[in-house]
Image (cartoon, grey):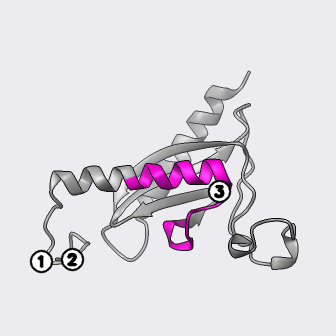
Amino acid sequence: MGDWSSDPYFQNPPDEDQIHNAAKLFAHLKYIGEKGYPPYQRAINFLDDGIWEVKHGHHRIAYFDTFGDGGYEPKGRVDDRREVDPELNDEFWWYPELDPILRLTNGWAKEGPKAPPEAIELAWLVREEDVEHDKP
């Protein structure tokens, strides 16, 4: 059984699997919120311009970080280990220190090797609306 709808053998997962996948996604997000880094490297991907995705199976949810005051500073994957505080968890040195609030934007089912551009664009739009709402 494949994971992508373009796979001719693809079948929608049973409802109990979909519920399990949602629970795993939210458990990953909770872990990130509590620890400041993902539970394991493959639980997340950096997408673009401060938008990250948490993933489980073929399910994805985009998120970004903010202080909740109407602004945000996009943070991407750290490319140079020298930019990282040596006190941070060494295994996840590539994951930036995020602002204290994580906001979810949108979700989708993975249907190809990369996140669909329209999913990333929707995440940007949701982020813009969200931070605008936070402004005093």
Look at the numbered discs 2 and 1 and tell me whether their residues touch, using CB distance below 8 Å. yes
- Asked if the magenta segment contains residue 39, the reply would be yes
The quarter of the rendered structure image containing the C terminus is top right
Element class at badge 2: loop
Tell me where residue 48 sits by quadrant.
bottom right
- Asked if the magenta segment contains residue 14, the reply would be no
Label 3: which residue?
50
Q: Main secondary structure of the magenta part?
A: helix
Query: Residue drawn at (64%, 35%), measured in percent from left and top?
Result: 131
Using the image as rendered, state which of residue 38 and residue 112 is in the foreground: 38
Q: Quick check: 124 left or right of 5? A: right
The quarter of the rendered structure image containing the N terminus is bottom left
Residue 2's tag is 2
Where does the magenta region start and end?
A: 24-45
Q: What amino acid is at disc 2?
A: Gly
Residue 9's tag is 1
* 10 Å crowding of disc 1: few (<14), some (14-19), many (20+): few
* 10 Å crowding of disc 3: few (<14), some (14-19), many (20+): some
* Between marks 3 and 1 in the image, the one whose residue lies nearer the viewer: 1
Q: Quick check: 113 left or right of 101? A: left
Report the Cα–Cα distance between label 3 and label 2. 30 Å
Report the Cα–Cα distance between label 2 and label 1. 6 Å
* Between marks 3 and 2 in the image, the one whose residue lies nearer the viewer: 2
